Image (cartoon, coloured by chain):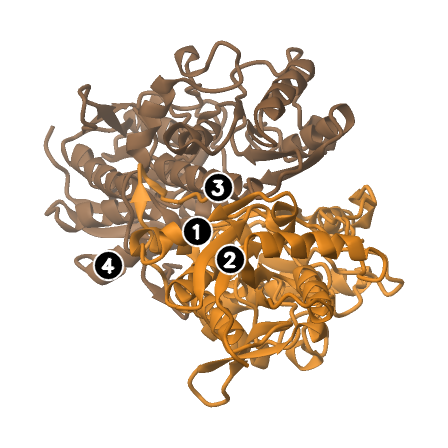
Chain colours: A brown, B orange
Amino acid sequence: MSTVRGNAIVGQSGGPTSAINATLSGVIRGASLSDSIDKLYGMVNGVEGLLNKSIIDLSYLFGDDDNLNALELTPASALGSCRKKLPKIEDDEEFYKNVFAIFKEYNIRYFFYIGGNDSMDTVDKLSKYSKKSDYEIRIIGVPKTIDNDLPMIDHAPGFGSAAKFIATTIKEIAADCAVYTTKAVTIVEMMGRDAGWLTCAAALPKYYDGLGADLIYLPEKPFDDDKFISDVKNELKKHPNVVVAVSEGIRYENGNYVGASNQSGAVDVFGHKYLAGTAKNLEALVKKEIGCKVRSVELNLPQRCSAHLVSATDIDESISIGRHAVKIALDGKSGEMASIIRVSGIEYKTELTSVPVCEVANNVKLVPNEYINEKGNNVTRECVEYIIPLIQGEKNIIYKNGMPTHIRLK
Amino acid sequence: MSTVRGNAIVGQSGGPTSAINATLSGVIRGASLSDSIDKLYGMVNGVEGLLNKSIIDLSYLFGDDDNLNALELTPASALGSCRKKLPKIEDDEEFYKNVFAIFKEYNIRYFFYIGGNDSMDTVDKLSKYSKKSDYEIRIIGVPKTIDNDLPMIDHAPGFGSAAKFIATTIKEIAADCAVYTTKAVTIVEMMGRDAGWLTCAAALPKYYDGLGADLIYLPEKPFDDDKFISDVKNELKKHPNVVVAVSEGIRYENGNYVGASNQSGAVDVFGHKYLAGTAKNLEALVKKEIGCKVRSVELNLPQRCSAHLVSATDIDESISIGRHAVKIALDGKSGEMASIIRVSGIEYKTELTSVPVCEVANNVKLVPNEYINEKGNNVTRECVEYIIPLIQGEKNIIYKNGMPTHIRLK
């Protein structure tokens, strides 16, 4: 397909990560090198910004290495985010006509959307509509999510940095817990509604250094209170300080969330339940059933925004996939998501590719069975070996006044 | 006073910090250079280890720069800790006779105890008993606490690193919160039962970079639900994403803890109440009274053990004060705590000194009035200028397998 010349637009959507701005920087770097892209616009707050023409010109950053380097280490979506779900095309064709009128107005021929499963739904719908439209535009998804639950990709950009934060923090918490001789249980809760990938990262410190999470529970396996208490009692026989890692989304056999009783039952626009009380509920359970000292730690927002502790591998890949997204658009692709393949072999090596976004949108990649041990209370060596390359390397963070420097685009 | 020759012993007590091992390293470095100290022993788990002769010889570390450098960046008490309160001398003289028999057995002439307010009570009692005893031993307290609530010292070693973690994390959380346009309140809870020093550190990012905690509530001022809700509403008028920083120990005028209703009422051996639900309770209050999106983040253990993000100033001072403790003991002092004076002037400069431990033990230094704004919902410039030098500088953390390396002594 021939290359079309015009402007490009990029947006960020869904939950922020520590690497989502690295991908934005990659798109900017890629666009700046192309003769087919004149201006690169940014949607402020994702498609919401597109709809109300809250659009800024990012072309001033072309070739500005200082600001792009700083952007790559700035946490959270620098262009802002949204959680807007687009209507079905058949339900509201007028909506799409309006969007495409804006594309025409700005002569936008390339559309890049950085996001997770839900954002890929937006990319899918826009690209499907574009096939019905006579306006030539290429619609590309660029993956990010700390949850690592995107299908059709070896691992999601953003996951490695969150995993590095979790592995490091679990290692530090385990060191903290080890100072007392009193029997104590510390329950650490990670994000992950359906997929336990982030919680798997809690396995790394003990695997490599002997001290870390002793028990790991993922949403992929039904949770059982009695089995959990029995697991904890067994660990307490071995050493006085037991560290437990749990996903926020662990559920009982009947499908009820372990964290549910502390919840309002509220759901977001995509119908996902808000969860927050999993570790708190297990803390109460241990207090009641075992009676020893117990506390809960919810890693909460820092696991997705601690940009001072990013994985260099993750940041570099996030930049590369942003550039790759521009490349595949220039190559004529549309309705695709830029993706990563892990090339098998002893050394970690990846290749970039692209996949149909319709196969990614709204789908979830769970932790596979072979990554979970038989007892369902830890992960396997295969799982550790899958994650460990993703957390390698550190970036040189620039501090000012004792705090990391961030830059702002909006 | 003449110098006595013999062995020394060092212990760590109370809550761990990211800098308490730097102080231990300072004691080791100081002892290794003295002709009067033959062996340096370590108590495993503080005075509990002393009592049951769980004592290890640390002299193998003399001159071992590699291990000492690694120790200085290892979080949590490498010798273990305890929360043992010694009996009053008049209540149980036998107890002290036993302790001093152990000192004699190991020919211990120098006793160094690294800890906070409660640990200084141990130092005070042992030094008082030593004056009644004919056994010559010098008993020295070495300060540490993330809480910064020790009197008779400009700031406590350990505080700077915790403050740097808090300032950085609040900055990152504020960046994360700023991505959405929906009105939202994020309430972040810091440690601090009586003193709000750690929560003061949440003021730094907004002061220096415009984005951070908008409202700050300390235990030093009575908390009022109505005033809080009114403060939050005012902030929401200015921008959609309000970040609130609160100390775990904030109390109502009547003395009840804001976090109390979520509590078991349990107290530790020193009679301190366990608190954990302050931000959670305020989250419920905002949901009820304002009805916007609201969430709570408890910084929890990571604020005291995130050694991957220490303040270089704090670590260097923590090492120096450990060495200084040895120096003052060799100078003949006993019943003293090594201390830091800030020399006034434009540039941050400190001097080391020592103070009578009896004036430190069991006392608390609160955030002074002039550090809190008139409305009681933020801190003043003086407060910011007090804290900012303490978080300066970063250490070169050594990573292995993508995680910081730690060393173990016991």
Q: Quadrant for the N terminus of chain A, please.
A: top left
Image point (34%, 56%), residue name: A56
Expressed as whole percent of the image width and height from the top left, the position of residue B126 reads 69, 63
Q: Quadrant for the C terminus of chain A, please.
A: bottom left
Residue at image mark 1: B58
Q: Of B309 and B252, which appears nearest the observer?
A: B309
**Marks 4, 1: nearer the viewer:** 1
Residue at image mark 4: A61
Vertical comparison of A28 with A208: above or below: below
Q: Of A217 and A257, which appears nearest the observer?
A: A217
* Residue type at numbered disc 2: Ile
Image point (68%, 17%), residue name: A225
Mark 1, Cα crowd under 10 Å, few <14 / some 14-19 / many 20+, is some
Sequence-wise, the earlier of marks 2 and 3 is: 2
Mark 4, Cα crowd under 10 Å, few <14 / some 14-19 / many 20+, is some
Q: Of A14 and A149, which appears nearest the observer?
A: A149
| Mark 4 element type | helix
Mark 2, Cα crowd under 10 Å, few <14 / some 14-19 / many 20+, is many
A57 on left or right of B97: left
Q: CA distance from mark 4 to mark 1?
A: 55 Å
Q: Do discs 2 and 3 share a chain?
A: yes
